[in-house]
Structure formats: structure tokens, C-alpha cells
Amino acid sequence: MRDKLCVSERRARMLDFLVKRKESTRFELALEFGVSISTIHRDIIYLSGIAPVYTKQGNQGGIYISPEFRSYKKLSHRSRGKLSLCFNRKFQRRRKEGYFVGL
């Protein structure tokens, strides 16, 4: 990305990037979005609060998004709200069970 994006645009595009790729690394995201690894770290912390984005350390480590997550951009506002509520309940339950590894 050559254009300088505002924080919210970068995070939205980062989420779309992860939805398409399913996994990445901090270094790869830093190169893609033209920001530092520290900025990527802060963005991942933020995104993990609103979407099922999580990290794994070590071999096979990286930044992942739950395979069940879908982008609802093409749906109507009402449909998005219903799906979001359903997904959030499932996500919160899994988070409580320790399914997602913290940063």
C-alpha cells in the first residue's frame, strides 16, 4: 500500500486482508501497509477486540482470523445486525473457554 491511510481505514483493510488470506505475520502486514511492526501490534490488539483475530507464537506462528468469520459488507444493515449478534455470542463464548490465544 503506497497511500497513507488513516487508522480506521488501515484497520478495515487489514481485517479484509486477513479475511482473504486467513493468516499473516506482523512483518508481512507492516510491509503491506507501510507502517512499523509496533503499529501492527497495536492494530492487532484493537482488531482482536472486534473480530476473532488471534495470534500464535513459535513455529507456525502468526496472526490468524477464525475461519468462521465472514465479512458482511454485501448484506443489508438488518441482516448484518442479526448475524453480528449471533457471531458475537459465539465468539464471546469461545473467548471465555480460552479458544483464542492472547497477544
Image (cartoon, rainbow, N blue to C red):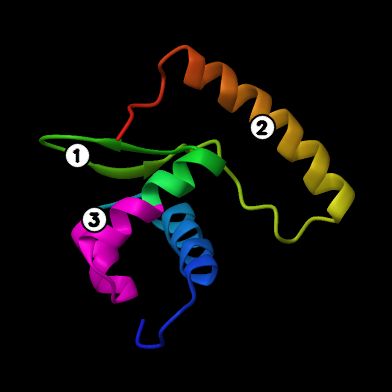
Kind of residue at disc 2 = Phe
**Along the horizontal axis of the image, is 58 left or right of 89?**
left
Residue 2 within the segment the image draws in magenta: no
Which percent across, then down, holds residue 22? Answer: 39, 49
At label 3, counting other C-alpha atoms closer than 10 Å, the crowd grade (few under 14, some 14-19, many 20 or more) is some
Mark 1 vs mark 3, foreground winner is 3
Q: Residue furthest top?
A: 97
Residues marked 1 and 2 touching at CB (< 8 Å)? no
Kind of residue at disc 1 = Gly
> To which residue does mark 2 refer?
87
Which percent across, then down, holds residue 31? Answer: 24, 72
Q: Secondary structure at mark 1?
A: loop
> To which residue does mark 3 refer?
26
Closest to the observer, 98 or 49: 49
Q: CA distance from mark 1 to mark 2?
A: 25 Å
Q: CA distance from mark 1 to mark 3?
A: 10 Å
Q: Looking at the magenta stretch, what is its main secondary structure? A: helix
